[in-house]
Image (cartoon, rainbow, N blue to C red):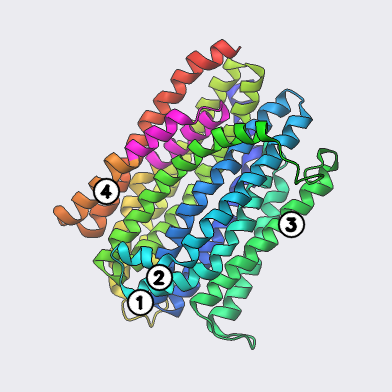
Amino acid sequence: MSYPAHARAVTTLGLPLVGGHLAQIAIGVTDTVMLGWYGVDALAAVTLASSYFFVLFLMGAGFAFAVMPMVATFDAEDDEISIRRVTRMGLWLSLAYAVVIMPFMIWSEALLLLMGQTETVAADAQNYLRIAGYGMFPWLVAMVVKSYLAALERTQVVFWIAVLATLCNGLINYALIFGNWGAPELGIAGAATASLVTQAIGMVGIVAYALYVLPHHQLFVRFWKADWEMLSRVFRLGVPIGFTGLSETGLFAATAVMMGWLGTVPLAAHGIALQCASITFMLHLGISNVATIRAGNAYGRGDRDHLARGARVVFIMSLITAVLTSVVFLVWPEPLVLVFMQSSEPARDQIVAIGVGLLAMAALFQLVDGAQAIALGLLRGVQDTTVPMFIAAISYWVVGMPCSYIFGFVLGYDGIGVWMGLVLGLACAAILLSARFWRVILGRVEVQG
């Protein structure tokens, strides 16, 4: 396949995935915008709570991400029985993880206080998590089924269901946060309720579609029957993916904690800048998902040339995306920050001043964040997850975390310094993971072929 043909295939498969990811992240953006209108204290608390939730979510999502390359490989081999087995056991592991993690949602205040957060912010964050935390169940189930559908190149519906869920989230938020349309004014609890209902709607939609369009796979027939051999395989592939995600999101959560040490206003500005960066990252994540699917197919066929050409295409597409989004952050930072606040907000000028600086740093890490995401997606496609796990841990916790603290507090650069650590951690991961992928191509896949 030629390079233009690869680019067309990536675009065709990737656009719905990118759209689905953007719609999903729009739920968090909606929460951030509306709570920013509600008050800076509420925005700061949900910024912290969302970071906390996402760290735990990404750890459990490792099993869903493991399903994607495994299903893609089995699809290349025309092995429908294994497709069903791996998806079921991915669901088993995801649900079990959600059960285990719920106490950390319900009693999160004590942990947040140990992290140095103020009593008010920690209490409000726990109020949010005690409701929104139950969304872990439908979100992880939906993630597994999305991975299954995406690996089979059925991505259009993922986008439309995500759009529907996002619209529902906005309407419920508007009603419950502010008490509109006769609903009670619940503030943070209203945002949490909206997120939970939204996740449930998304799960029902995606599962119903999978059962309708692929009934012969019989995903939920005798769902209770254990398949220990396949469960073990998904577990061995998924746990390193989960820990890799934990390393990266843990770094971002740690920066939220550090920003909380600087005060409510810097934490609120951090939440706004991070939401903007998260939106653009969804573009890279969609391309990364396509990289996983196509690499999994090439790996299943032992087609090294197809894998190498496809890898070059997705790296270039991610680079172009990063350059364009960086320009937006650098040229229009103030309008982006102002979207999240009302004109009557007393701390508006302070938040804008801090947010503009943070968006400049976000523009800088777009390049490296996209590269590490693409490299991870390709490595997952060839089912190489253990070494990347250690690379991520070193990059984010040995390089990124200490640098955030040193630049932010020892050298006194405050929020900008904290984000400098993010850039360095992501850059280290991008370099090491990219080097790892090209070594895998020349070695493991060549032997496979």
Of badges 4 and 1, nearer the viewer stands 1
The residue that mark 1 highlights is: 120
Q: Residues in magenta? A: 368-395
Q: Dot 4 corresponds to which residue? A: 420
Badge 1: how crowded within 10 Å, few (<14), some, or many (20+)? few
- Give the Cα distance between marks 2 and 3: 30 Å
State whether residue 20 is above or below residue 90. Answer: below
Mark 3, residue position: 205
User: Which residue: 57% across, 22% down?
Assistant: 307
* Secondary element at tag 3: helix
Mark 2: few/some/many CA within 10 Å (<14, 14-19, 20+): many
Given the image, on which type of amino acid does mark 4 rest?
Answer: Met
Relative height, residue 6 to residue 107 (above, below): above
**Which three-letter amino acid code belongs to the residue tagged 3?**
Gly
Q: Is residue 121 magenta?
A: no
Residue 45's disc number:
2
Q: Of marks 3 and 1, which one's residue comes earlier in the chain? A: 1
Q: Residue at x 34, y 59 (%)?
A: 256
Q: Quadrant of residue 389?
A: top left
Residue 73 occupies which quadrant of the picture? top right
Left or right: 141 in relation to 242: right
Task: Answer few, some or many: residues within 10 Å of disc 4's Cα (few below 14, many 20 plus, some between 14 and 19).
Answer: many
- Disc 3 or disc 1, which is closer to the eye? 1
Q: Which of 448 and 420 is in front in this view?
A: 448
Tell me the CA gap for discs 4 and 1: 28 Å
Q: Viewer-proximal residue, 45 or 40?
A: 45
